[in-house]
Image (tube, rainbow, N blue to C red):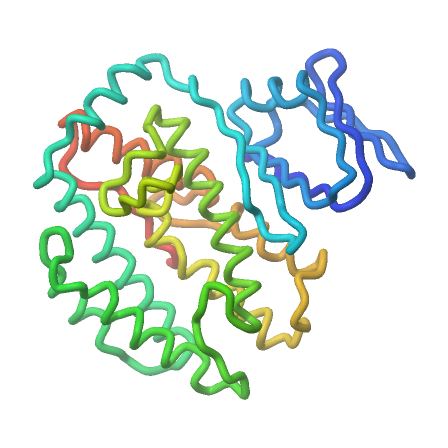
Amino acid sequence: MLKKTILLENKTSVSTKNLQLVIKTELRESTIPAEDIGYLVVDHPQVFLSIPAMNLLIENNAAIIICGNNHLPNGMFLNLNSHHIQQEIFRVQMEASLPLKKQLWQQTVVEKITNQGLLLEKITGESNSHPFLASRVLSGDTSNMEGVAANLYWRAFFENSILQFKRERFGDFPNNFLNYGYAILRAATARALSGSGLLNTLGIHHRNKYNAYALADDMMEPFRPLVDEKVFELVERNEGQDLTTGVKVELLKILTQTVYFNDEKSPLMVGLQKTTSSLQQCFTGEKKKINFPKLWN
């Protein structure tokens, strides 16, 4: 079932009644079954979220995303008991060999570079060197083809636009749009990993000791071009430079964008679950390859 995303941008109280969420603003009151919700995004300092409401959401494997004063997501609540053999999966994940993790990272980087090349070709109408770079990725990406590809990608991305762009985490517009989209994608990936019984803290490549979502940062990489594409569209439509409600709604729609698995298609939030489930099977030895979807048909 396709889950809903709820964005709270005004003074709101969220409580429960009869296993449903009761969402009350100054203008209206509405109810929604907790099982229908995939993401609750809190982007206002005067949102009251009751503990029973939080528990009900988490029990239904929803992700609760908290935004800061800059309106960018900076915190998240996830279900830590969402799989029936949780401990066994944690064990095989922790005991995964270095060669296995290097192979999984190689697959992930190849997929990311391939998707960047496809999007760049869509935007510029010209072929690029990304397919060649993808073919040169080694186990563990020891030659840093990811970095080489990213440098070429961002130099060409807005080349035909009047926009003077430099990709920086805290840089000028449209970095704020990209950062918001990536944060939502990160939350969606973390939710899918948790639903597959995997521990987000244990990455296959990202290893920062302060990062609680290292595995989500790994697995979201091939999906980043979906955010890039949406931001490119917003810039081309001249939607302004601020993270307005309309812009955030457009970026949240990425979660329901269609991705493709062979003869099957799925919304991104469902596709992420299929990908993370295949990653879990790589850790348990049932599969050797992560099942990444095609982002465009």
What residue sits 31% from the left and 13% below the top? 85
What residue sits 40% from the left and 28% below the top? 194
Instruction: State the residue in front, 11 or 282.
Output: 11
Instruction: State the residue in front, 61 or 171.
Output: 171
Query: Residue 67, how many percent across, how many down?
Result: 62, 45
Instruction: State the residue in front, 12 or 230.
Output: 12
What residue sits 37% from the left and 48% below the top? 220
Q: In the image, is residue 37 above or below residue 180? A: above
> Extreme front residue here?
209
Q: In the image, is residue 225 above or below residue 39? A: below
Query: Seen in the image, is 89 located left or right of residue 231?
Result: left
Q: Quadrant of residue 173?
A: bottom right
What residue sits 29% from the left and 15% below the top? 87
Can residue 235 be seen in this snapshot?
yes
In the rendered image, the quadrant that contains the C terminus is bottom left
Instruction: State the residue in front, 206 or 285.
Output: 206
Query: Residue 114, how many percent across, how many down?
Result: 26, 63
Q: Quadrant of residue 64?
A: top right
Query: Seen in the image, is 225 located left or right of residue 29?
Result: left
Query: Residue 91, how many percent across, how many down?
Result: 22, 20
Can residue 262 be seen in this snapshot?
no
Q: How many marks?
A: 0
Query: Seen in the image, is 225 located left or right of residue 131?
Result: right
Q: In the image, is residue 107 above or below residue 22? A: below
> Extreme right residue here?
27
Query: Residue 61, how many percent across, how many down?
Result: 51, 25
